[in-house]
Each structure stands twice: as C-alpha cells, then as structure tokens.
Amino acid sequence: MNPFPKKVLVTGGVGFIGSHIVDTLLLRGCSVSIVDIGERTDTRNEKASYYHVDISDRASLEGVFKKEKPEAIIHAGALARIQPSFKDPERYFMVNALGTANILSLSKKYSVKRVIYSASSSAYGDQEMPLQEHMAVATQAYHPYGSTKRMGEMLMRDMGIATGGPETVCLRYFNVYGPRQTTEADGPYATVIGIFFEQSSRNAPLTVVPDGHQRRDFTYVSDVVEANLQALVSPHVGRGEIINVGFGNSNSIWDVVRFVYKLDGSIIPDEMIKKGYATYAPERRGEARETLAHTALAEKLLGWKPRVSFEEGIERTREFYRKQGWNV
Ligand SMILES: NC(=O)c1ccc[n+]([C@@H]2O[C@H](COP(=O)([O-])OP(=O)(O)OC[C@H]3O[C@@H](n4cnc5c(N)ncnc54)[C@H](O)[C@@H]3O)[C@@H](O)[C@H]2O)c1
C-alpha cells in the first residue's frame, strides 16, 4: 500500500457522494479542502476548508491549488444528472470535460500525486449484463451527461500519466444511494430512492417511470466512499484504469417500491397500482433498461468489495430520513 495522503482536495465535496467522502477522510485524520459551487449547507463539513470555486474557471481554481497544495484529489464535482443535460449540453461540457482538464493540468503543475475520478456506468449504455470494464462504450446516442463524463475518463488516461502528470484512476459508479441524496423536494431531477422516500413520507403513490421493470445495480454510498479511499492508496492503480464500483446485483424499480413501502415480496405491480402505492409517470429520455456491475476488477486492483446489501442500505437510508422527522 502507498502511504495515505495527508492533504486531499475533494471537488463536489458538498454534494451527495463528495460530502460522505469528506467526512470519512476527516475521520481518518486527513486535512481536507473542498471545491464546490453548490448551495447545500446541510452537507458541508466545517472541519474542511471550503472554496466556492467553479472548476471550469481555471484561474480561480489555480488559487486553491496554490494555497492548499493537495497531495491527492478526489474529483467528484460535476453536473451529475441526465435529464438537465439535454437542455444545456454546453454547460455540461464546460464543467464535466473542461473542468476535469483544468483539474488535471493544475495537478501536473502543482505536483499532485494521484487523482481519483468519479466516472459513471452510463458510459456502457444498453448491452449484455453484467457490464465489464473491457466492454466497448455506448455507441448509440444517450445523453450529454454520459458523453461528458466519458470525456473525463479519457482525459484521466491521456492527460494523466501520458503527459507526465498525476497518477489517475476512474471509478465507474452504479446508481449510488443513501443518506443526503437529493429528493423530490430538491427538484425534478432527484434520484429514484430519494424521490420515493419523500413521496412515501407524504403517503403519496410512488411515481414509477415508465413501466418499473428496468433494473439498477444500487450501490450504497459508504461502499463508494471506501472504493475511493482504497484507490488513494492502492499500488495497483494509477494509469487511468477504469474500474466498476457497483454492488453486483440488480433490483427493479418495483422492488424499490416494495422495499420503501415494506410490502410483501409477492405483491405484483398491478396490485401496487390498484392499492395506491404507486402510479405511472412518463418515460424519460436516455436512461438504460438495466445496469449490473461485474466487480472482480475492483477486488483485484483495489482489494475492494461492496458490503452493504440493498435491504440494509434502504433501512439505513430510511433511518436517516426518520431522524429528519420524516414519516417513512
Ligand atoms: N449518484 C450517482 O448515482 C452517480 C453515478 C455515477 C457517477 N456519479 C458521479 O459522482 C459524482 C458525484 O455525484 P453526486 O450524486 O454526489 O452528485 P451531486 O450533484 O450531489 O454532487 C456534485 C457536486 O458537484 C458540484 N459542482 C457542480 N458543478 C460544479 C462546478 N462547476 N464547480 C465546482 N463544483 C461543481 C455540485 O455543486 C455538487 O455539490 C459526479 O461526478 C457524478 O457524475 C454519480
């Protein structure tokens, strides 16, 4: 193992995943700085230094590098949702691609040792399951979110080691969920488990898009944090490797409805609709029918295995919302 870095910069460190990474790094004794332009205050750890800086603004970002001199970067900052990317693809390019290039060129200039990139399973598109890293990326048109995140992966490979820059590694996350994920109360582009808990807190029917039979490899956020920490120290990565970070099991959206409302596993979709637990909502563009990660590479290169089952993760998430006073 390489020594654990003492100074880590986390981009997107007040976001859902980034804030959990920040908390864990601080618990492990790191000095942590955050670059983020988000407005959330509930997720910001006051023990980290905070810079309200846009990663697409190279000059301002350089000020942070100069001051903080991080040894490693966890680059989780991004425009992270699919649907709004159809409306403003240029902005997605500026943040997810150009912003990532800025991180890499400044990392080279300020001798950052390693950059860990939050990549996305959306790179695969629809193909045979399980999804393995050697598979070709999606050739069909999907969404600007997916292509700009994919550009980030390519930059990690070619602007990292190839230019004498930092070591890099790309972790392709699969549907991350858990405490602090956005809910419907945060806007129309929240992720499904957050939306469902918010709806269930109001005893409202859960909005199933479009037929509920699509499947997702839901991955609990603490497992994703652990993969990032392993990627900081593993001696087996650093050359732009792409590694799946998923649970290795998939659940349908109907399964999520059953878990959130604690329904019997045998209840069929028609009955859930009839009894008012769920209702159909219109299809959304660009979303894959299924995701399921093959996770052997993460075990081999990072010594990482997911630990939190879907059942346990859902209950931990429920507990989080309960503590916030929600009736879930
Ligand atoms: N949540 C998932 O299921 C999932 C799956 C695959 C990949 N990812 C990737 O993981 C990372 C974190 O995602 P998340 O779910 O925590 O999303 P999030 O939106 O909660 O976090 C992203 C953070 O980046 C910040 N940000 C956006 N634009 C910025 C800019 N120009 N400069 C600085 N900061 C900026 C946002 O303010 C936000 O706090 C993203 O890179 C995302 O693409 C997430």
Image: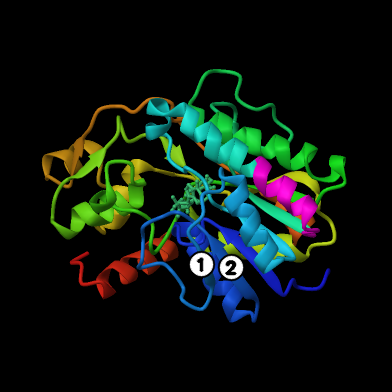
Circle 1 residues within 10 Å: few <14, some 14–19, many ≥20: many
Residue at 54%, 71% in the rendered image: 49
Whether tag 2 and tag 1 are in contact, CB under 8 A, the answer is yes
Left or right position of 258 against 117: left
Q: Quadrant of residue 67?
A: bottom right
Circle 2 residues within 10 Å: few <14, some 14–19, many ≥20: many
**In the image, farthest residue toward the top:** 140
Left or right position of 200 against 182: left
Residue under circle 1?
50
**Does residue 130 appear in this view?**
no
Q: Nearer the viewer, residue 141 or 213?
A: 141
Residues shaded magenta: 101-113
Q: Nearer the viewer, residue 55 or 231?
A: 55
Helix, strand or loop at mark 2 = strand
Q: Is residue 40 magenta?
A: no
Query: Which numbered disc covers residue 33?
Result: 2
Q: Earlier in the sequence, mark 2 or mark 1?
A: 2
Q: Quadrant of residue 327?
A: bottom left
Q: Quadrant of the C terminus?
A: bottom left
Residue 182: percent from left, percent from top: 34, 53
Can you tell me whether the CB of the residue at mark 2 lies under 8 Å from the nearest atom of ligand 1?
Answer: no
Residue at 70%, 30% in the rendered image: 135
- Residue 44 higher or lower than 79, as above or below: below
Q: Nearer the viewer, residue 126 or 114?
A: 114
- Identity, as a three-letter code, of the amino acid under mark 2: Ser
Residue at 12%, 45% in the rendered image: 276
Q: CA distance from mark 2 to mark 1?
A: 6 Å
